[in-house]
């Protein structure tokens, strides 16, 4: 919120924020947590035992639900990112900003999916091939697996959840960018006298009379923001009032 003085009247000017593609911490942190919880279905038995929940882990037989845990984790990661970035895009963004925003969504979701799969593979390998190697590495489907200690079927589930989550995020609808208005987007909102109104500069690329102030002052034509105080060309603006006065004088003179 800034203050401008125009025609002797002090007004507060609130800039309308542009959509940016800056990484968002909340969806990334939430999806990382969801991915880590999903990775605890098998190799996470070490952590369950660390917190005294080994009996509960064995009772629930969570190691039997590896596909379900990884699939649910991937879906949750996709849902968190899609809903969060879709909401941000629907606030309004132009073509470059929307493209950057969607790219940031893919990067953040990709980091979360890779983290989930990596955590699952690491914890499973640590449990079967290191901590309890004497028990599990005697079995052929653990010892002869592509990654020792991680069954090939479980490795396939992990990779499938990674690819499936990325494909699902790619096909979900994303808000389309707003059509360019022909001028740079640096509109502002003026708040004064109990009312607010949008202030938009004259399009820099408009030729002839469209690129000029109705009062006779020409606007910038090089695409740069207008210098000096911002003007609003709608009803009630100084320029519109001056134009109305000139029309009244012409009418009376005739």
Image (cartoon, helix red, strand yellow):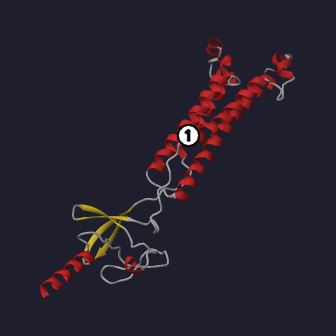
* Residue 180 position within the rendered picture, expressed as x and y whole percent measured from the top left: 47, 62
Q: Is residue 209 left or right of residue 158?
A: left
* Quarter of image, res 70: top right
Q: Assess disc 1: are there few (<14), some (14-19) or many (≥20) residues with their C-alpha within 10 Å of its C-alpha.
A: few
Q: What residue sits 86% from the left and 16% below the top?
A: 138
Residue 11 or residue 78, whichever sits in front: 78
Q: What residue sits 68% from the left and 18% below the top?
A: 63
Outermost residue toward the bottom?
A: 253
Outermost residue toward the top?
A: 59
* Quarter of image, res 54: top right
* Residue 183 position within the rendered picture, expressed as x and y whole percent measured from the top left: 45, 69
Residue 105 or residue 123, whichever sits in front: 105
Local SS, label 1: loop
* Residue 98 position within the rendered picture, expressed as x and y whole percent measured from the top left: 53, 54
Image position of 10 with respect to 106: above or below: below
Image position of 23 with respect to 53: above or below: below
Q: What residue sits 20% from the left and 77% below the top?
A: 244
* Residue that badge 1 annotates: 172
Q: Is residue 65 visible?
A: yes
* Residue 162 position within the rendered picture, expressed as x and y whole percent measured from the top left: 68, 35
Image position of 88 with respect to 171: above or below: below
Q: Is residue 50 visible?
A: no
Q: Is residue 205 left or right of residue 33?
A: left
């Amino acid at each position: 919120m800034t203050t401008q003085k125009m025609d002797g009247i002090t007004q507060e000017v609130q800039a309308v924020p542009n959509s940016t593609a800056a990484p968002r911490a909340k969806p990334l942190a939430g999806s990382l947590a969801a991915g880590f919880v999903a990775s605890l279905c098998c190799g996470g038995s070490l952590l369950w035992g660390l917190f005294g929940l080994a009996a509960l882990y064995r009772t629930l037989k969570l190691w039997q639900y590896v596909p379900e845990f990884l699939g649910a984790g991937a879906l949750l990661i996709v849902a968190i990112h899609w809903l969060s970035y879709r909401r941000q895009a629907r606030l309004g963004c132009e073509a470059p900003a929307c493209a950057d925003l969607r790219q940031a969504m893919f990067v953040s979701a990709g980091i979360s999916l890779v983290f989930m799969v990596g955590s699952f593979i690491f914890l499973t390998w640590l449990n079967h091939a290191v901590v309890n190697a004497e028990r599990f590495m005697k079995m052929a489907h653990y010892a002869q697996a592509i990654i020792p200690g991680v069954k090939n079927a479980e490795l396939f589930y992990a990779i499938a959840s990674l690819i499936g989550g990325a494909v699902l995020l790619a096909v979900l609808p994303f808000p389309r960018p707003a059509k360019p208005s022909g001028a740079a987007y640096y509109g502002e909102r003026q708040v004064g006298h109990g009312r607010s109104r949008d202030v938009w500069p004259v399009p820099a690329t408009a030729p002839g009379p469209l690129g000029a102030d109705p009062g006779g002052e020409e606007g910038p034509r090089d695409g740069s923001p207008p210098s000096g105080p911002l003007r609003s060309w709608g009803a009630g603006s100084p320029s519109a009032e001056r134009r109305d006065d000139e029309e009244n004088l012409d009418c009376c003179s005739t």
